[in-house]
Amino acid sequence: MKHIRKAIAAAAIIPLALSACGGTGGATSEGGSDSKDIVIEMWAGGENDQKAIQTQVDIAKKLLPDYNIELRTAPWGDFFTKLTTNMASGNMACVTGMNSGRLSSYVDGFVELTDADLETAGLKKSELAPGADEVLMNKGKLYGIPFDVATMLVYYNEDQLAAANAPVPAPGWNFDDFEATAKAATANGKQGFAVGMGDFQWMALPISKAGLQPVKEDGTLDLTNEKFAAAADWYAGLVSEQKVAAEVASASELGWGEDQFSNGNAAMAVDGTWNAVSYLTNESGFNVGIAPLPVGDSGESLGLVLGSGFGIAKNCENKEAALKVMGALLSEEAQDFVASSGRSYPARASSQPKYFESLDEAYRDKVQAAFEAGFANVQGQRVSDEWAQVSAYLTPELVNAYAGRAKLSDILATAQGQFK
């Protein structure tokens, strides 16, 4: 469990299963406008990731036997460093991987996908799980189709809650219920909750409580929205006012909340669906429960749908061929593989049951129930053009907000003024 935070760093992070980026040199024109030579670039973190993405590429090759499809991969960080260079030089691979949290920085390199493009690719939005078509959308425009989806959930230590006789989280619970559980579980040197440092980990509860995101549909920052600012102050107050969560030791503790929960120091924490199995099979040996985010002021639990997928580079000379390759990579057969491998939760609705079938029977039903509840009301993440800078500014400031040295709403206001 102590290594779980490493899985988060991408996702959102989510190097959720696949991917590949230019390994040796650029990859674009790939043979001219009539060429069927197509390069795929995606990130891959290690041997298992390489095998997973290669299997999907092999499926695409089988579906398109007359195409010459080449896969290039690189580790997460190297992938985006190289992608920045390739986009600037007009040398992106025709089919390039993209993550929902990074898209706003790279929209200039991708073509906007039309309904006609999706038809060429053999894909239909109706075949995707609810909200999945928003994963690689920016300011209302579609730039890619995801191969997997994720959302945020509340994980809780069943043993710690039982020992404290604390209320157990369940679908439909609200923020009063959350506070009651956190307060009851704060005892015997343990905390009821562990605050997060990553964007998704700390923003999930304020977003659900406020019923809205801190970015408008057109990509405009909305950090000073009255409802979101109040929800953010409430969240920071779990540490400084309600005393149900510990202060974060330092800004370098990016996996603070996840580590506190994993080590048994806190009864609850928020994290992504991508870590569900890791928590359930934790090395510490405690029993883990999973619940959707609490119901907020709007009467619903609002979550974000996140994920990774593929788009088509603007500089690609054979767009039609690239679309067909992208479609093959996201075909039912390829999505069934993603699901049955258990590596990530597929974006195609018909393939999702196979993900649960791949899990151990001991926790299969628990995961399925939590996922179904967690994905019941989701929106694609909205980010501004400056979101990377906003995130870099906010992260270290969270430490001061949790310690009560500054109001989180004031910090948000400063960011709004600086990055609007």
Image (tube, rainbow, N blue to C red):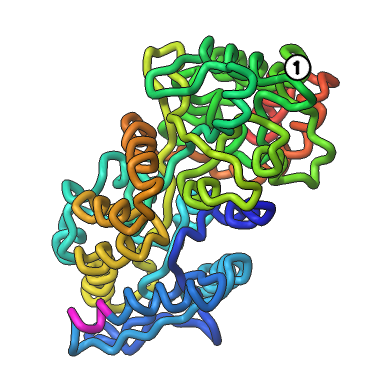
Residue 129, percent across and down?
A: 26, 45
Magenta stretch prevailing secondary structure: helix
Relative depth, front residue between 220 and 4: 4
Is 5 displayed left or right of 128 in the figure?
Answer: right
> x%, y% of residue 79?
56, 70
Instruction: Label 1: state its secondary structure.
Output: loop
The percent position of residue 159, horizontal first and vertical second, equals 59, 31
Name which residue lies at 40% across and 46% down.
363
Quarter of the image for residue 173 reads top left
Does 105 appear in magenta? no
At a point 45% along the width and 11% down the height, the residue shown is 297
At 56% from the left and 19% from the top, the residue drawn is: 228
Q: Nearer the viewer, residue 238 or 99?
A: 238
Q: Name the residue under label 1.
A: 243
Residue at coordinates 36% horizontally, 55% vertically from top-left?
359
| Residue type for callout 1 | Lys
**Up-down relation of residue 19 to residue 129 (above or below):** below
* Of residues 193 and 221, the one drawn nearer to the viewer in this rendering: 193
Please say whether residue 61 is one of the residues in the magenta stretch.
yes
The reply to whether residue 410 is visible in this rendering is no
Task: Give coordinates of residue 240: x percent, y percent.
Answer: 78, 17
Report the span colored magenta.
59-63
